[in-house]
Amino acid sequence: MRRRPRVLRGTLLRDGKRTGPNYVPFTSAATRSVGAGAAVAQAQRKCACLPGEMLRLGVLCLWRRRPLVFGVPAKNLGLRKVASGVSPPGSTSPRALNIFDRDLKRKQKNWAARQPEPMKFDYLKEEVGSRIADRVYDIARKFSLALDVGCGRGYIAQHLNKETVGKFFQVDIAENALKNTLEMEIPTVSVLADEEFLPFRENTFDLVVSSLSLHWVNDLPRALEQIHYVLKPDGVFIGAMFGGDTLYELRCSLQLAETEREGGFSPHVSPFTAVNDLGHLLGRAGFNTLTVDTDEIQVNYPGMFELMEDLQGMGESNCAWNRKALLHRDTMLAAAAVYGEMYRNEDGSVPATYQIYYMIGWKYHDSQAQPAERGSATVSFGELGKINNLMSQEKKSQ
């Protein structure tokens, strides 16, 4: 049975004001009241009678606006020590597929971190960061030295304390994110570096964490190998990344609208890793005692355009090389109509589903529990079925 998602209901208002997200029980799945063909037909009728306020330039610019980036030297990133580890172009491993424009992703994250009120868009990353911190607290030990790969504005570190982590290194590709980190209790060091090319020595950290960053790397196996390399023996890696069902409502709506209006569609939502591949990738990188689980967070928005605005504010806009630079106006309006017809809630809002994969892996150490040798068992599986009879007979004899 599929796990029922927990709803993160962001109270977003059409006038642009936002209040803090509140948590409510999940009551019903996203409504799919009409089929794809009927939704497209209804979208055609709705696009012809949409109010003029929906056609204002400010809404359409969300699809065309490119983030503006201003160079910030590493020496100006506050009092923290910053070591540049950003890889030069073309330095990925030969086996890696060059799917994402990493330079564009850096610009997107820099632009998002430079906004006047970036905390308005931090609700999802702060929630996942708190869940990563909860998994850190579940391990009964103190980590003298920890590393956050793709830290953003410090969404994990703000939930940790000195009793759990002694010193915390934060790595991100965006200098503005490191400059505008959140307040935290533990001492931190910010490092400007790429997730695929960590500038640290082998066996350095007791703990490595990562939250909603690894889905943008071109070479995920290499990134996991780098994390394994910098971990000390018996060190642990705890990470979270978006799963394959993330934003399926948006993906489906855009595909239907673009196919109907333009005779074909381009990918507008970046590809994600499948959950059954994560275990293989972690094992291939050298981790053992693996744990991979999945969760869903559903956020309700007034409409598709508000969802797109928040994705841009999070720095999560698409940066795939094969992305389409511009969507036509009638295609966007048709996609919004399809989104509403297929997934609208009873209160008029539309849901967006974020599937989160959580993973835990340990670096080998002799002190860890080892499997017993083959053939050392003293009880066969065939005898396990007789345990209930033996226990009942023993109770009767007593």
Image (tube, rainbow, N blue to C red):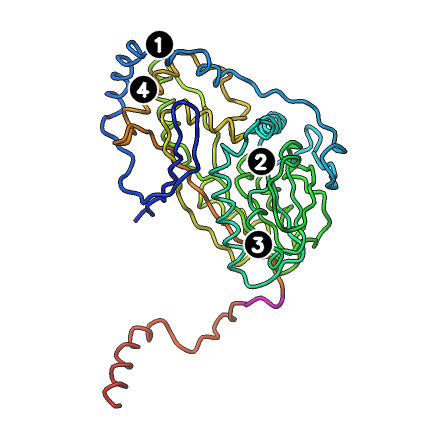
Q: Whole-Å distance between the Cαs marked 1 and 4?
A: 15 Å
Amino acid beneath label 4: Ala
Label 1, secondary structure: give it: helix
Amino acid beneath label 1: Gly
Check if residue 369 falls in the magenta segment.
yes
What x and y, as percent, mark residue 288? 55, 57
Q: Earlier in the sequence, mark 2 or mark 3?
A: 2
Q: Nearer the viewer, mark 2 or mark 1?
A: 1
Check if residue 368 falls in the magenta segment.
yes
Residue pointed to by mark 1:
52
Q: Whole-Å distance between the Cαs marked 3 and 4?
A: 46 Å
What range is drawn magenta here?
366-370
Q: Nearer the viewer, mark 3 or mark 4?
A: 4
Q: Earlier in the sequence, mark 4 or mark 2?
A: 2
Q: Whole-Å distance between the Cαs marked 4 and 2?
A: 33 Å
- Please say if the residues under marks 1 and 4 sit with CB atoms less than 8 Å apart: no
What x and y, as percent, mark residue 57? 45, 11
Residue pointed to by mark 2:
217
Q: Main secondary structure of the magenta part?
A: loop
What x and y, as percent, mark residue 66? 56, 18
Q: Whole-Å distance between the Cαs marked 3 and 1?
A: 56 Å
- Write the residue at 69% across / 32% down: 91
Label 2, secondary structure: give it: loop
Residue pointed to by mark 4:
337
> Dot 1 surroundings within 10 Å: few (below 14), some, or many (20 or more)?
few
Q: Earlier in the sequence, mark 1 or mark 4?
A: 1
Q: Quadrant of residue 71?
A: top right
> Dot 3 surroundings within 10 Å: few (below 14), some, or many (20 or more)?
many
